[in-house]
Amino acid sequence: MRKITAILGYGRKNIASHFTYPSDVVNAAYSISLSRAGCLPFLVPATENPEIIRDTIKAVDAILIPGGADVDPSLYGEEPAYSEETSLKNDNFQIMAIREAISQGKPVFGICRGMQVINVALGGSLYQDLEKEMEGSIRHTCYEKPESPAHDLKLESSGFLSLLLGKREMKVNSLHHQGIKRLAEGLKVAAFSPDGLIEAVENREKRIYAVQYHPEALAMADDGDSKALFSFFSSIIGDR
């Protein structure tokens, strides 16, 4: 039986001009990649209702937090400096869902913004803009080539990516201008970019795994490493 995986939605301005309320959206590459790995994905609309979040987490086997807009810096104790589009409603929803999933012992998988939200939910902080705040930062905003490698990753020998793929380096895409500054307690680094930015984290005991790059986009271009990552996530969920 397929493993029910909740993709946490992100409410945005309505995509149909005749509607006044927002739309909950997610790139189809996430659901396609999860489906190919044996999961049954569905979109969970953003809400700040704790009862709905609790019941949703009870009903699923795992959650995935996808890419999206910036995390509001007030959530990690900073004033806005270089953050762009933010939404406290979306942030609060995803942070509440992450904490609830951990409380219920459900696996958590984060991609790009998803990794950043996990870090903030657990007490870490972010660079609001890598080029402006991180000395020696390479270019991470390669938005023009989402399905192509942009830079190398250095994999920690004991990290999940190295153990999964059987290597110490890999090439990934890069579509972000923020990143982890202070790592949250309980998370372990699994990969760095050449400038030292954290690019993957994990907590095996709590089944938390997250990457800064976009494996769903690479998987759509038939990248074997990215498809293996989704299969890995499916495998840690366990059977229903």
Image: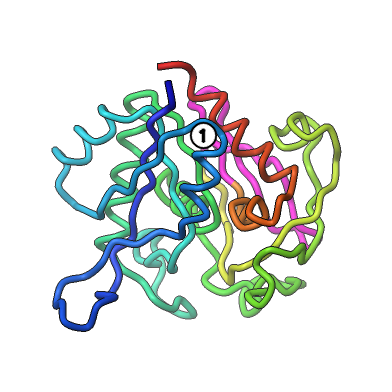
Residue at image coords 39%, 74%: 79
At label 1, counting other C-alpha atoms closer than 10 Å, the crowd grade (few under 14, some 14-19, many 20 or more) is many
Residue at 51% of width from left, 46% of height from top? 110
Q: Residue at x 77, y 72 (%)?
A: 136
State the count of labels.
1
Write down the region rendered in magenta: 185-210
Q: Amino acid at mark 1?
A: Ile
The spot of residue 184 in percent (x, y) is 51, 44
Image quarter of residue 21: bottom left
In depth, the one of 131 and 165 nearer the eye is 165
Residue 86, image quadrant: bottom left
Question: Tag 1, which secondary structure?
Answer: strand
Depth check: give the residue in front, 177 or 217.
217
| Residue 208 covered by magenta stretch | yes
Q: Quadrant of the C terminus?
A: top left
Q: Position of residue 152 (x, y in %)?
A: 81, 57
Q: Is residue 44 left or right of residue 163?
A: left
In the rendered view, would you say 194 is above or below 39?
below
Residue at horizontal 65 percent and vertical 38 percent from the top: 229
Q: How are the colours assigned in the image?
A: rainbow
Please, is residue 79 above or below residue 50 in the view? below
Q: Nearer the viewer, residue 98 or 166?
A: 166
Residue 54 part of the magenta segment: no
**What residue sits right under mark 1 in the picture?**
208
